[in-house]
Amino acid sequence: MKKPKIFLTFAVCIIAFIIYGSSESTITIYAIGDSTMCHYDPAKDLRVGWADGLKSYFNANVIIENDARSGRSSKSFIDEGLWAAVIAKVQPGNYVFIQFGHNDEKTTTSLHTDPYTTYIGNLAKFVNETRAKGGIPVLFTPICRRNFGSDGILKDTHGDYPPAMRHLADSLNVILIDMTVKTTALVQSYGPDSSKKIYNYVDAGVSTIYPNGNTDDTHINARGANLFAGLAVQGMRQQNLDIAAYLAPLSISQEGINPVAGSFQLYQNFPNPFNPTTTINYSVSHAGHITLKIFDVRGNEIAVLVNEQKTAGVYQTTFNAANLSSGIYICSLFNGKNFKVNKMILMK
């Protein structure tokens, strides 16, 4: 029996996507900053930088290169040659997301900067050199620390660094997303106890990475990265960045960032890269039969995650790749007429 034409067309489109990628041009975001922003190996650390959280909100046409590094200030990022390596890669139309402050505050000579002199001087260097390459700089004030007073009110720990960045943004006419304000409001809404769910708090005996448990009021976990990245996304929309056209519609709640119902969408899996599990969100605009499948780069079907009738709404499922090898996989959502596809990266 011949397969229906629609399924042949679907298969051809899947293969074309795997081989050639999307027909739209790609945009690269380079993220530079400190440990609250950078990438961590999930097999060795439960911290998750908020820039990694961004990957779940953009479609496959946006490449996020997380070049942030733990323990760096704006000064040491330049002195160690990390900035030179990043700016050498920047092409016209690329974005550079810039967040420093946590380590600039430290008194160590190799890290410390003064808010209104050396700090904004370094930020201006990032901005001006990005613009000289035809790139688009975006400043992000540092995310808040979980620092509650006895009255249950979150206390500021960044001093003059956020105001100094705001001043520079005004003087150079640079787009600024105020993560200090946004994250402070969100963490305050959780309160002293529930906010531990956002940060890198781990009970003893829960993780082999932290066998004795862990208490960390500076760095966030996967849930925190998801939430904070959503706040950054919110800021991109508010600033009317062109790159917002590549974002999925979102709503923000204390349970996380959620796709908005009413559209047929496949959202980028999170985390991505992942090992060995990842979460996939998708939305269905009309009732109908839905399939959600995983393919390898040769077009071979690896797994069927959903194959059933669905009503309109937003759904979430988990993919476990424990038995698969590292590599690129394709997630495909099909409603009998249209399909959406995303690339996923398994790193073991």
Image (cartoon, rainbow, N blue to C red):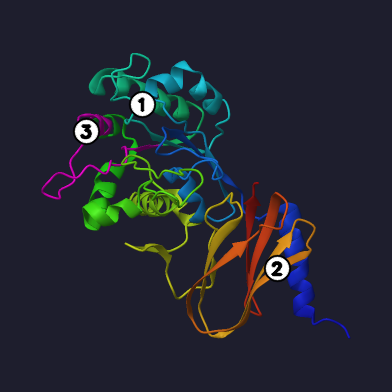
Query: Residue most toward the left?
Result: 151
Task: Judge from the rendering whether residue 16 lies leftward or rightward of residue 236; answer left or right.
Answer: right
How many C-alpha atoms fall within 10 Å of the one at disc 3: few (<14), some, or many (≥20)? Answer: some
Kindly state the secondary structure of the residue where label 3 is placed: helix
Tell me which corner region of the image, top left, top right, bottom left or bottom right, holds residue 119. top left
> Would residue 178 be seen by someone viewing this image from the given angle?
no
- What separation in Å lies between label 1 and label 3 (alpha carbons)? 13 Å
Task: Judge from the rendering whether residue 304 lies leftward or rightward of residue 63; answer left or right.
Answer: right
What label does residue 29 carry, if any? none
- Front in this rendered view, residue 207 or 3: 207
What label does residue 163 carry, if any? 3
Q: Which residues are magenta?
A: 138-165
Q: Earlier in the sequence, mark 2 or mark 3?
A: 3
The residue carrying mark 2 is: 303
Q: Nearer the viewer, mark 2 or mark 3?
A: 2
Residue drawn where x is 75% and y is 59% of the image: 16
Tell me which corner region of the image, top left, top right, bottom left or bottom right, holds residue 147. top left
- What separation in Å lies between label 2 and label 3 (alpha carbons)? 50 Å
Q: Residue 109: x percent and y percent?
A: 33, 13
Q: Nearer the viewer, mark 2 or mark 1?
A: 2
Q: Is residue 58 above or below residue 144?
A: below
Task: Judge from the rendering whether residue 92 lies leftward or rightward of residue 33; answer left or right.
Answer: right
> Would residue 12 be seen by someone viewing this image from the given angle?
yes
Amino acid type assigned to the residue bearing label 2 in the image: Ala
Q: Is residue 215 above or below residue 116?
A: below
The residue carrying mark 1 is: 123
